[in-house]
Every structure is written in structure tokens, then in C-alpha cells.
Image (cartoon, rainbow, N blue to C red):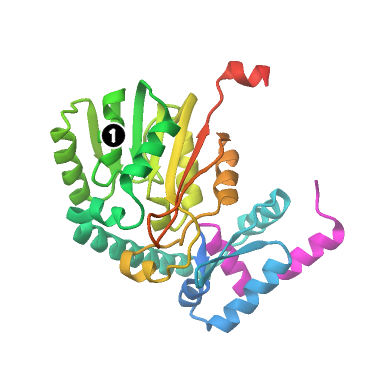
Amino acid sequence: MSLSADQTVEALRAAGEPTRLRILSLLGGEELSVMELSRILDQSQPRVSRHLKLMTDAGLIERFPDGARVYYRLSHDAQARRLIDTVLDILADDAGEADHRRLDDVRKEREAAAADYFEQVAPQWDRLRSLYVSESAVEAALERAVGPGPFERVVDLGTGSGRMLTLFGKKAKMSVGLDLSQNMLNIARTNVSRAGLDKVELRHGDIFSTRLPAASADLVIVHQVLHYLADPAAAVSEAARLVSAGGRLVIVDFAPHDFEHMREAHQHRRLGFADAEIRDWLTGAGLTPSAPIALPPDNEGLTVTIWTAERRAQSDRKTA
């Protein structure tokens, strides 16, 4: 479906201002908050908010609240994205290079804060998780969702202390765990060794660019990782890329909540995820989602949700 002449004019008019073009270029990289955009652009938040509202109304970008903060991303509409990409492709803007350097500074500060946090809490990581919901209940539900196996290859992205590897490693011929924290990897190595698992490879790796072969795992796990990320959709896409035909991706994370203190106290960037949001990411990555499993806390706290999706085998696609 194409844009009408009126829609095209409206979209071009909304984009037709230097600051708005800079914003579109920045949002092409990741989701950003008003505060982050204001800092990068060196403009007041009210001024930036006015630009964002005009482009949101024109369908060029999408606004989504997350706790007390509001984030923006480029529209998922195919025609709107085509128009944005065309405009940005022909744009030669020196100011944009400076913007992206400042965006890199924001990312580095964000990553440094998260890294410091992980290094401090690594020894108590599993105990920290248990504060939110019974870990035994989560793991029991996770085992039911994943099935009995056996698995050819399990990949755990953001492996942390290696708990998912010790939980599923005995059902797999080979397992791989990736994490950006060397301290976490050291703890994972200790835990894997204590579990008597010798077919496990632990790597220092980035969830956004794993450098693992496509369709190389029949079970990919992303356990309590997405809420720390600036671009969780990109992480889901990369995780889905690794899933082989007939294989499964499992995501464990929080349902939407309003525990705003989690941002500063525990470096959470997103305050949970809605089922529809995760479903859209999974289907967009070519997977077929199953019904999510919600696990409310034992007491007052956060609900944990398990989302699973499969990549259909070729024979299944032909008969569907």
C-alpha cells in the first residue's frame, strides 16, 4: 500500500526541518528518550518534544511510554520507513556526524554504568533475581515450555552466572554462553564446572552481534536481559537469526511495571514488556510465537513472563 499525495506531503512537511532530520537520523540507530535527544541535540526538552510531536502526528515516528519516561523510535510502517530511508540516504549533513558522536558518548556512559553495576552485583546475581519472583517457579515453567530435549545446540545470550547453561546443558550435545562481563563469565565458568558440564563454551560476546552462524541452534535463550538494552528489538532479531528450522527461541523477562527505582538502583532501561510488543518482534523475525506464560510474584513485586517462538521446519510451512 502506497502513501497518498496528501500523506506524502504531510510526512515531508513534518520531516522538512533541520532538527527533525537530525532526530530521524539518530532514531535510525536506536530508541531514544526525550532527555537523551535533548542532550545530543543540545536543545531544551520542550523544543525537542515539539519536534517529536509533529513527526509522531505525521506517522514518521512512534512514541511509547516506559514507566515515567517516554521513548521514540522510527515508524514500523513500511511506506513511512521507505520515505525516511530515502530522505536520509540523500542527506549530506555534517551536523549529523557530530550528533552520532554525541550519541556514542551517551551509549558509552550508559554501558559503563551498566558494566559497573554488573561487576558489583555479579557475586549476588542469582540472589538478586530471586527477590522478584521464585526462581524455582520460573525454572520449572521454563523447563515445561522448552520441553525435554535433547538439543543439538543451546545458545544462552547474556548468560550471566550461567544458570540457564547448568539448567539445560545436560540436555544438550553442545552449549554456548555469551556475556559482555568478564566477571560474569568467570562466575559462569565456576558454576558450569561444578555442574560437571564439559560441552559448554563461554565467550565474551555482544548480544547485538553474536558472530555465531545463522540457524545454528535449536534452542536460544534470552533470560532477564532485554530490560537492560537500548534496542531490545534488535537483540530479539539477532537471537531469532540463530534459531534453526524446527528450533525455538525462549525469552524470559518482566511484564510491564511501574517500579521506577529499578532504573537507577539496578540499571533497568525498560520497565518490562507487553505481550503484543514481544509478539510483533518475534513474528517480524520470522518465528511463530506460542501463548506467553505469566508468573506473578509470590508477594508484592514483578511479574515474570516467558515468551516462546519456533521457526517452522520447511515441511511444516508447505502443509500450513
Coordinates of residue 38 in the picture (x, y in percent):
50, 77
Say if 20 sits above or below 162 in the image.
below
How many marks the image carries: the answer is 1
Find residue 57 and report its image quarter. Answer: bottom right
Pick the residue in front: 295 or 90.
295
Say if 209 sits above or below 256 in the image.
above
Magenta stretch, overall SS: helix
The residue at 44%/52% (across/down) is 296
The residue at 60%/45% (across/down) is 280
How many residues crowd around disc 1 within 10 Å: few (fewer than 14), some, or many (20 or more)? some
Coordinates of residue 84 in the picture (x, y in percent):
66, 57
The residue at 55%/20% (across/down) is 313
Looking at the rendered structure, the secondary structure element under dot 1 is helix
Seen from this angle, which residue lies furthest front? Answer: 299
**Image quarter in which the C terminus is found:** top right
Which amino acid type corresponds to the residue marked 1 in the rendered image? Leu
**Horizontal relation, residue 203 to residue 59: left or right:** left
Residue 114 seen in this snapshot: yes
Pick the residue in front: 108 or 184.
184
Coordinates of residue 171 in the picture (x, y in percent):
31, 24
Is 23 one of the magenta-colored residues? yes
Coordinates of residue 226 in the picture (x, y in percent):
42, 52
Residue 16 seen in this snapshot: no
Residue at label 1? 167
Is 253 one of the magenta-colored residues? no
Magenta residues span 1-29
Say if 97 sits above or below 156 in the image.
below
Find residue 220 and report its image quarter. Answer: top left
**Horizontal relation, residue 79 to residue 216: left or right:** right
